[in-house]
Image (tube, grey):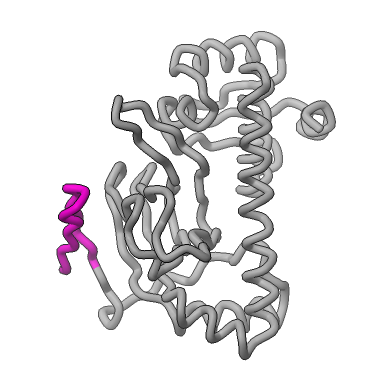
Amino acid sequence: MMLKRNVRSGHEHHLAFSRESGFTETLPFLRLGARGPQQEILRQNIHALRRGPIRYRRNKVIVCEGDPAEYIFLVVSGVLRRCRTFRNGARSIIAFHLPGELFGWTFDTAHALSVEAATDATVLFVKRSALIASAGQNNAMANFLLANTAAELEHIQKHSVLIGRDAKFRILSFLTDLAQRTGGQNRVDLQMPHHDIADYLGLTIETVSRTITELERAGSLARQSRRTLLLKDPKSLAGMLN
């Protein structure tokens, strides 16, 4: 067990490395990676460069805003959030990251946002300098990083546009995107709590809950369980949102 302290921010959290002690989990499907042999090349390269896995409890801080950007992150399980907390206690969540997603690439020397566990999560750390070196020697890795970076930028652009829309549009867009990213088609498992969704969409918790109920009554959604929603006619919803 290794203890990492961030003295500047006051955050303290435990990092449970199991580098040599029986890491048997299979690396998750790398989103935006090539299929077939190219996918396996990417998997092998990431596996060779990784540190961890590291397991975090919900709400634990992984890196703080301003920390050195030495690593980028690959989500093995759970959900991570990238956010900024302001002096008055308000918080903005910029992105959620799901299993199989590699993120945190930056040309700066420090992270612009904090990264936290929105749920219990397992994360691999990949050395940024080693990844750059690998990309210089491997076209599959270089193309993967380019596609991954482009997708991150596109997601941030969509999120900035989303904040200007009404509550129903924001929530339907969020749920549709989540269903697509998890491969659930019309099923959405809301692992993150409502206050995280509210901070991501720029809404209050009450507005999130009320709007989901209104969408249920209108027939756009159906609740399968407390945490699981079903999108009715997701293709039509996607067309409406575009």
Furthest toward the bottom, the residue is: 137
Q: Quadrant of residue 179?
A: top right
Query: Which residue is at 16% across, 48% downward?
Result: 10
| Picture layout, residue 41 above or below residue 145 | below
Q: Is residue 5 above or below residue 90?
A: below
Measured from the top left, where is residue 43 in percent x and y?
56, 77
Q: Is residue 63 left or right of residue 29?
A: left
- Compared across the picture, whether 2 is left or right of 63 comes to left
Give the residue drawn at x 27%, y 47%. 60
**Residue 194 in the image: x percent, y percent?**
44, 26
Q: Is residue 33 left or right of residue 106?
A: right
* Residue 53, quarter of picture: bottom left
Residue 100 percent across, percent down from the top left: 54, 61
For the N terminus, give its image quadrant.
bottom left
Is residue 60 part of the magenta span, yes or no? no
Seen from the viewer's position, the closer of residues 64 and 16 is: 64
- Foreground pick, 100 / 69: 69
Magenta span main SS: strand
Residue 37 in the image: x percent, y percent? 70, 83
Q: Nearer the viewer, residue 79 or 165?
A: 165
The reply, left or right, for residue 95 in relation to residue 52 is right
Report the magenta residues as a range: 1-16
Q: Quadrant of the C terminus?
A: top right
At 52% from the left and 65% from the top, the residue drawn is: 107
